Amino acid sequence: MSVTVTDCSAESLLQEFHHYLLLERGLSAHTLEAYRRDLRQFTAWLLEQHGHSDLLVVTTELLKEFVADRFEQGKNARSVARSISGLKTFYYWLLDEGQVGVNPVSLLPKISQVKKLPGVLSERDVDDLLKQPDRADPIEARDRCMLELLYATGLRVSELVGLQTGQVSIQQGLVRVTGKGQKERLVPLGQLALDELEDYLRHTRPLIANIGDSDVLFPSRKGGFMTRQAFWYRIKKYAVLAGIEQQISPHQLRHAFATHLLNHGADLRAVQLLLGHSSVSTTQIYTHVANHRLQQLYQTHHPRA
C-alpha cells in the first residue's frame, strides 16, 4: 500500500520530527539520537537501493525489503525491531500531520516473519532483464555487461560500480573484490559473463567518452566511476522494458544470485563465501526462499502430494 505524496524534502521532515520529539514528547538526548540515527540509516538505504529519498512514497513492500537487507547485513532481530519502531513512530506523526494517508509500518508483519526475502526475481525475470540493453549502443552495452556481471557474481552494487580493470581476469575467470571491512574475496565468473566481459573490454569500453587512461571498469559518460544511484536508474529502465512489475533494485540481483544458486543445489557455505558474508547465519536468510521452491516442486511432482 502506498503513502500519499507531498512535496517535502527528507531533511526538512526529519528536522520537524526531531522538534516534535523534543518539544512535545520531551524525549531524552539519548533517545533523540537513536531516532535520528535510525531514520538517517533508512533514508540513506532508500537513496542507495531505490535512487531517491522521498519518505512520503514508502510502501510496506519496500519496508519488507529494508528489513530483509538489515538481516542480510548481520543485524539481529532486536536491532531491526528498534529501527522499525522508530519508523513506525515517524509515520504515525506524518499521519497525524496529514502528510500521508496511511502508516506503511502498521501493515508490516512481525519482524520474525519478514526475515525472509520478499519478491525474489525468478530466473525468467532475470533472463528478460538481461536481454533489454541494446549492444549497438555503447552505454547500453556497458549496462548489459554490468547486469550480467552482477547476476553472475552477486556483488554488492557498491562493489560493482567501484571495480577497476585490474580486478578482473578473463584468463582465470575471476573477479577480485574488496568488500566490507576491506576484506578481499575471489569470485568466479561463468562463461556467459566471461564472454560478455571480454566483448565489452575489447569493443565497447574504448568507445565510452572521456575514458583516457582511466582504469575504471565501468566508466560513466565522463569517464569516472558511475554512482550507485545512476545504476539504479538504469536497472529501473530495463525492468520497465522487460515488463517486470515488482519494485526492483540492484540488490535484488544479488538476492537472485544467492537464491538461484541454492535452488540448484549449491552449498550454503559456498554461497556465503561468494557473497562475502562474515557469518553463515546471515546467508541462511536465502534458505527460506529456496525451501519454498522445494515445497512447490514437491507439490507439483510427488505422486502422493
Image (tube, helix red, strand yellow):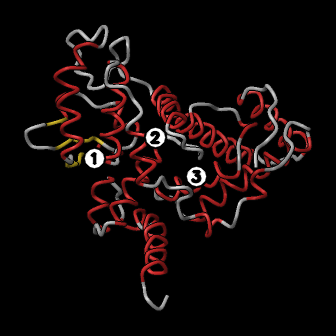
Three-letter amino acid code of the residue under disc 2: Pro
In the displayed structure, 51 sits above or below 194; it is above
The label number, if any, that marks residue 65 in the structure image: 3
3 and 2 marks in contact (CB < 8 Å)? no
> Secondary structure under badge 3?
helix
Residue depicted at x 36% and y 37%? 147
The Cα–Cα distance between marks 2 and 1, rounded to whole angstroms, is 21 Å
Local secondary structure at mark 1: loop
Q: Where is residue 162 in the image (x, y as percent from the top left)?
A: 33, 30
Q: Which residue appears farthest toward the left when viewing the image?
A: 171
Q: Residues within 10 Å of mark 3 (few under 14, many from 20)?
A: many
- Direction from residue 73 to residue 43 in the image, left or right: right
- What is the quadrant of residue 67 in the picture? bottom right
User: What numbered label is drawn on residue 104?
Assistant: none
For numbered disc 2, what is the local secondary structure? helix
Depth check, front residue: 238 or 39: 238
Q: Mark 1 points at which residue?
A: 183
Task: Return the residue at label 2.
Answer: 250
Residue plotted at (86% across, 36% down): 99
First of labels 2, 1 by sequence position: 1
Residue extending farthest bottom: 304
| Image side of residue 228 versus residue 99, left or right | left
The answer to whether one can see residue 112 in this image is yes
Q: From this viewpoint, is residue 186 visible?
A: no
**Image-based side of 32 in relation to 142, left or right:** right
Q: Residue at x 86, y 39 (%)?
A: 20
Name above or below for residue 138 compared with residue 255. above
Please report whichever mark, 3 or 2, sits nearer to the chain's N-terminal start: 3
Residue neighbourhood size for the residue with mark 2, other residues' Cα within 10 Å, grouped as few (<14), some (14–19), many (≥20):
many
